[in-house]
Image (cartoon, rainbow, N blue to C red):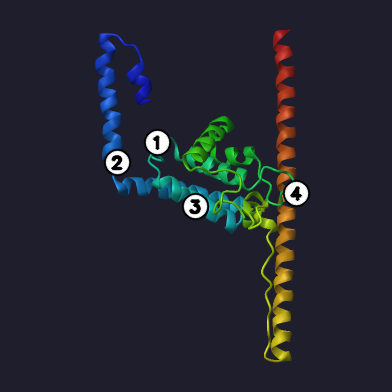
Amino acid sequence: MIEYLKKRKMTKASKKKTAVRLYQIQRREVTMTEDEKKQRLDEIKELVLDFCEEHLNEELAGYALKLCDTLGRKRKISITRGKKEIWAASIIYVIARLNFLFDPENELFLSADTICDYFGTKKSTVGNKATQIEKACDLGVGAEGFCSPEISDALTLVELPNGLIIPKSMLPKPEIVVEFADEKEEEEFQKYMAEQQRIKEREAAKKKARCAEINRKIAKDKDKKKKKKEQDNQLGLFDEL
């Protein structure tokens, strides 16, 4: 905005107003205290967490909060400008894009409409802001620390000693050998592993059910919008008559 105002051709009458406006903008940027910036960041984090509690899991919430902190340290993009709802929606949008949550086949499928409807924002605005965030934070597909290790490893290439380049996920996994003191300890371990497997299966079933519920809601909302549009068109025809 500042660069636009500097380059813009103005009359003498408007130059003074523009100079005052420039001064106000620059003064606000300079006088913004660390406490005010931290408060702003906390407000955005709170919005992000509220959304994650309703739509995402703990792992993805961690990635979103990490991105909040990363943005708070950046100088070339300021979280103090613009609506906090747009920032929160854009941060979620970035994490969703990096983790392929927009893919309907994903267990944690999330649509852009769900994000924007929750925060009351426009998809175009959020999409553009998300792209700005990715550029400012140098985030691309497979960015470590912002997407699951499975995605990161699959999209990260490594060079072997023989010069062959393969995805990190193809590297051989270290073999883990567990030794037990006696049969009782082994039996307890097996019970523990079986319980963990049951928990994992229950979580997977919950995610699948939630994904199906979200898809039904999206389809229902689309159907409502379609019917409303048809009704509006019919009313328009009556008005013309």
Q: How far is mark 4 from mark 1, CA to CA?
A: 37 Å
Amino acid residing under circle 4: Ala
Amino acid residing under circle 1: Arg
Secondary structure under the numbered disc 2 in the rendered image: loop
**Of the image marks 3 and 4, the number of the one nearer the N terminus:** 3
Q: Seen in the image, is 153 located left or right of residue 71?
A: right
Secondary structure under the numbered disc 3 in the rendered image: helix
Where does label 1 land, which residue? 81
For the image, the number of numbered tags is 4
Q: Residue furthest front?
A: 162
Give the residue drawn at x 70%, y 30%: 225
Give the residue drawn at x 34%, y 20%: 5
* 125, 230: nearer the viewer: 125
**Of the image marks 1 and 2, the number of the one nearer the N terminus:** 2
Query: In the displayed structure, would residue 6 be above or below residue 164?
Result: above
Percent across and percent down for residue 96 are: 61, 45
Give the residue drawn at x 75%, y 28%: 227
Q: How far is mark 2 from mark 4, CA to CA?
A: 45 Å
Where does label 3 land, which residue? 65
Kindly report which numbered mark, 4 or 1, lies closer to the viewer in this rendering.
1
Amino acid residing under circle 3: Leu
The circle on residue 32 is 2
